[in-house]
């Protein structure tokens, strides 16, 4: 369920504004380059934002051992973790209640198995899928008081479909506490936090690269995107995705790309991942219950766009 790719390209970010008022920082984390631009604030603010990003990148790494307690070190023995990691993991378990039924933080080993198989241009065997699903269904995270937790079962934790959005939520909270309203935090294009642009109307213009010459104007929101257009692997007549269905174990998505505009990066990231397996009717119901706006793309065409989003051609 690793996140994700880049159907979004931010364009005209500095049009009609003075670049002298922009400070910028770049940091490599979450397997991408995250670009932070502040139109107000200080270099100290940028440093604090970088610290938030690097912290959540470290604790959510399920591939390499890192210093301190990370998700790779959570096993069957109860362990005390920092509140930030405890809250992140608790949120990852609870997010299904918000409609992300195809998001599961315990599908790490299934996702790794698919990744290795597709790298060899092979479809993962049904036997391996069945074995991994058995692990997932028999596993759980257990949360105890005082930030103690442990994992039942053999499934591995994977927070790739949620952690960038969660980190952006923490950054938005930080920016609000420091009265900073004009900014752009671009976490690898798949997870973007927009404040206001340094122009009269405050809107950013966003290009949707899965579509020809199609744009949208947004501000003060999160943009979360899932797509199979870059990392998809075609074997025979079927394109297999890096976004894995934790319910049936397949790597086949119903949609080609899903864009979610929301007031929460965590929710937007989880929903855009999960909605790759949802029908349009199901997506409409989730929109109503969670107050998000969605664009669904299939075969390079918009098959659904929330009426509150105004796509336009440049």
Image (tube, grey):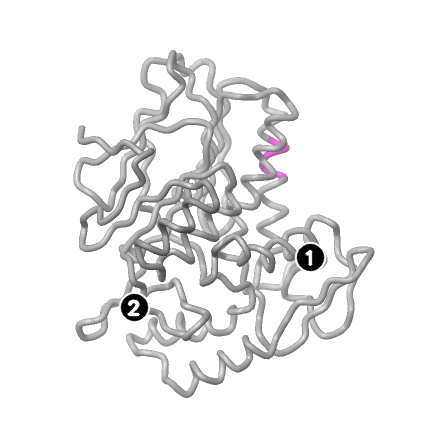
Asked whether 67 falls inside the magenta stretch, the response is no
Examine the rendered structure and indicate whether residue 96 appears above or below residue 188: below
Residue 251 percent coordinates (x, y): 35, 70
Residue 70 percent coordinates (x, y): 66, 59
Give the residue drawn at x 78%, y 69%.
Answer: 78
Q: Nearer the viewer, residue 144 or 155?
A: 144
Give the residue drawn at x 57%, y 19%.
Answer: 41
Give the residue drawn at x 42%, y 55%.
Answer: 273
Question: Which of the 4 quarters of the picture holds residue 280?
Answer: bottom left
Q: Nearer the viewer, residue 93 or 198?
A: 93
User: From the viewer's perspective, is 217 left or right of 140?
Assistant: left
Say few, some or many: other residues with alpha carbon within 10 Å of mark 2 (under 14 / 14 to 19 / 20 or more): many
Give the residue drawn at x 45%, y 84%.
Answer: 130
User: From the viewer's perspective, is 279 left or right of 44?
Assistant: left
Asked whether 48 falls inside the magenta stretch, the response is yes
Which residue ends up furthest to the right in the rendered image? 146
Residue 183 percent coordinates (x, y): 48, 25
Residue 201 percent coordinates (x, y): 38, 15
Question: Which of the 4 quarters of the picture holds residue 200?
Answer: top left
**How many numbered discs?**
2
User: From the viewer's perspective, is 167 left or right of 37?
Assistant: right
Q: Which residues are magenta?
A: 47-51
Examine the rendered structure and indicate whether residue 253 appears above or below residue 272: below
Say few, some or many: other residues with alpha carbon within 10 Å of mark 1 (under 14 / 14 to 19 / 20 or more): few
Name the quarter where the N terminus is drawn: bottom left
Name the residue tied to disc 2. Answer: 240
Q: Which mark is residue 67?
A: 1
Tell us which disc is closer to us: 1 or 2.
Answer: 2
Give the main secondary structure of the magenta stretch. helix
């Amino acid at each position: 369920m690793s996140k994700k790719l880049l159907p979004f390209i931010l364009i005209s970010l500095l049009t009609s504004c003075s670049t002298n008022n922009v400070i910028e920082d770049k940091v490599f984390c979450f397997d991408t380059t995250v670009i932070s631009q502040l139109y107000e604030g200080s270099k100290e603010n940028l440093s604090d934002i970088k610290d938030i990003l690097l912290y959540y990148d470290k604790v959510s790494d399920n591939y390499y051992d890192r210093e301190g307690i990370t998700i790779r070190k959570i096993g069957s023995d109860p362990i005390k973790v920092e509140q930030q990691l405890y809250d992140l993991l608790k949120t990852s378990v609870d997010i299904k209640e918000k409609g992300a039924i195809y998001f599961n933080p315990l599908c790490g080993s299934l996702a790794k198995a698919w990744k290795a198989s597709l790298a060899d241009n092979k479809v993962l065997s049904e036997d391996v899928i069945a074995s991994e699903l058995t692990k997932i269904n028999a596993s759980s995270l257990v949360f105890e008081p005082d930030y103690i937790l442990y994992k039942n079962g053999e499934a591995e934790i994977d927070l790739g479909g949620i952690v960038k959005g969660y980190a952006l939520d923490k950054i938005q909270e930080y920016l609000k506490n420091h009265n900073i309203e004009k900014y752009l935090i671009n976490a690898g294009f798949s997870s973007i936090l927009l404040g206001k642009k340094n122009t009269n109307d405050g809107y950013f213009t966003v290009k949707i690269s899965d579509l020809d010459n199609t744009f949208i104007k947004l501000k003060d929101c999160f943009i979360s995107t899932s797509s199979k257009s870059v990392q998809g692997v075609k074997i025979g007549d079927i394109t297999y995705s890096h976004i894995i269905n934790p319910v049936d174990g397949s790597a086949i998505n119903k949609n080609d790309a899903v864009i979610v505009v929301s007031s929460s990066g965590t929710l937007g990231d989880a929903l855009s991942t999960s909605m790759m397996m949802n029908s349009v009717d199901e997506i409409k119901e989730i929109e109503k219950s969670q107050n998000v706006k969605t664009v669904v793309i299939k075969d390079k065409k918009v098959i659904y766009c929330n009426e509150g989003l105004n796509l336009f051609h440049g």
